[in-house]
Amino acid sequence: MNKGGNADDSNRIDELKNVINLGKQIFGFFDGLMRFYYEITPLLGRINQSIEESSSKLPRASDSLSRVTKETERATIEILDILETMSQTIEEGKVQIQEYRTRKQKRNDTIRICIRYLDTVAQTLPVEDAGKLRKKISEITPESEDEDILSSVPGYFDRIADYTSDISISLQVQDITSQQLAAVNHLVESVHGRLKHLLDNYSGAESSPISEMVGSDPSTFDAEAEYNRSGDKQNLADALSEQHRQSPASQNSNKEASNTQILPTQAEIDKMFGS
Amino acid sequence: MSDKRVLVVDDSATMRRIVINTLKTIGYTNVVEAADGKEALGQIYPNNIDFVITDWNMPNMSGIELTKAIRNDGNYSHIPVLIVTTRGIKEDIVEALRAKVNGYIVKPFTPQVLKDKIDQIMKTTTQ
Ligand SMILES: [Mg+2]
């Protein structure tokens, strides 16, 4: 044997040792993996069962949310019915008060004519009788003190009408909350759809494509809807609309000019609102 | 009292009711309603509509799609459209203006805002 041959043999033995070591490591890894699999299988079964249970409750949750929306809408419309009746009653009340004031005015005019006539009659009477008559005349004053009270009544009616209109602004909250609920519903339906897809995959059943599992159409509600009476958003809309209106292309809207170019850029909008 | 025929479009029955009640108080009693853009398109011709007040987010056809459909129809492209929506970010407002709405109202709105917008639109579109 030569020196070179010994070195080759030693290298081969080292390689073999490495392979055996690697084999041991891989075996250890697969052994661990199998043990993990056996441990996790019953757990997966339990998770599956739990998902199945909660998933079956999701359509009920979605129905409950839809029912909340429908019932609050019905109650809101009932309130709006009452508000409308109130507004009509207020208007009728105002008409009645006006009618009363007109009739009262006519009666006062008649009384004034009578007073003038009696005054003329008093001039023809003996002094004592004329005095008595004038005393009586002074008691039938046409300018009754209740006129100022009466004239303030329509103002009260107007204020009540303003309150009813304030209530109707507040009732817009129903549309806003229904959109927020629709957003939650969409989420519930999406989660349900995806869980169902996973369960179908797990149990080997034929599952629907994932695209059919996103729940209701998100374009039918505004997930960002909020009840905000600050008027900030309206001011922004007014400012942008005004800028749009004053642009030359907008003033000539009959022409087929694209109004894309006349709208403010995002940078201009940001500058305008300091954002 | 105005003889203009107004079409109120919103998928929320509450909002339709609020808009219609407000319209009545400012003299618009000739009102037709629809629950989405598609239904609204079918109402324009038979009711000879002069003015459209529409929500944005609705099933079947949105308020923006409705506005575009009106603008693209030679017979109705002149009809003013006022959008009344919960959406109030810059991008939304710009999108609506690009779709050629004549006015933009953010919910919740006051009757005064609705009246002002209608007056303003009537003034500019009947000139
Ligand atoms: Mg809507």
Image: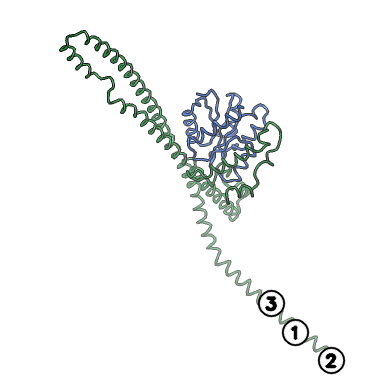
Chain colours: A green, B blue
Looking at the picture, how far across and down is residue A172, in whole percent? 47, 39
Is the residue indicated by label 2 positioned so its CB lies within 8 Å of ligand 1?
no
Q: Gap between marks 3 and 1, in whole Å? A: 14 Å
Q: Gap between marks 3 and 2, in whole Å? A: 31 Å
Q: Earlier in the sequence, mark 3 or mark 2?
A: 2
Q: Which residue is mark 3?
A: A22
Crowd tier of the residue under label 2, counting other residues whose Cα lies within 10 Å: few below 14, some 14–19, many 20 or above? few
Q: Quadrant of ligand 1?
A: top right
Element type where label 3 sits in the image: helix
- Along the viewing direction, whichever of A22 and B48 lies nearer the viewer: B48
Element type where label 2 sits in the image: loop
Looking at the picture, how far across and down is residue A76, in whole percent? 43, 37
- Along the viewing direction, whichever of A134 and A68 lies nearer the viewer: A134
Identify the residue at the far left of this view.
A128
Element type where label 1 sits in the image: helix
Q: Which residue is mark 2?
A: A2
Query: Pointer 1 indicates a residue of which chain?
Result: A
Q: Earlier in the sequence, mark 1 or mark 2?
A: 2
Q: Earlier in the sequence, mark 3 or mark 1?
A: 1
Q: Amino acid at mark 3?
A: Leu
Q: Which residue is mark 1?
A: A13
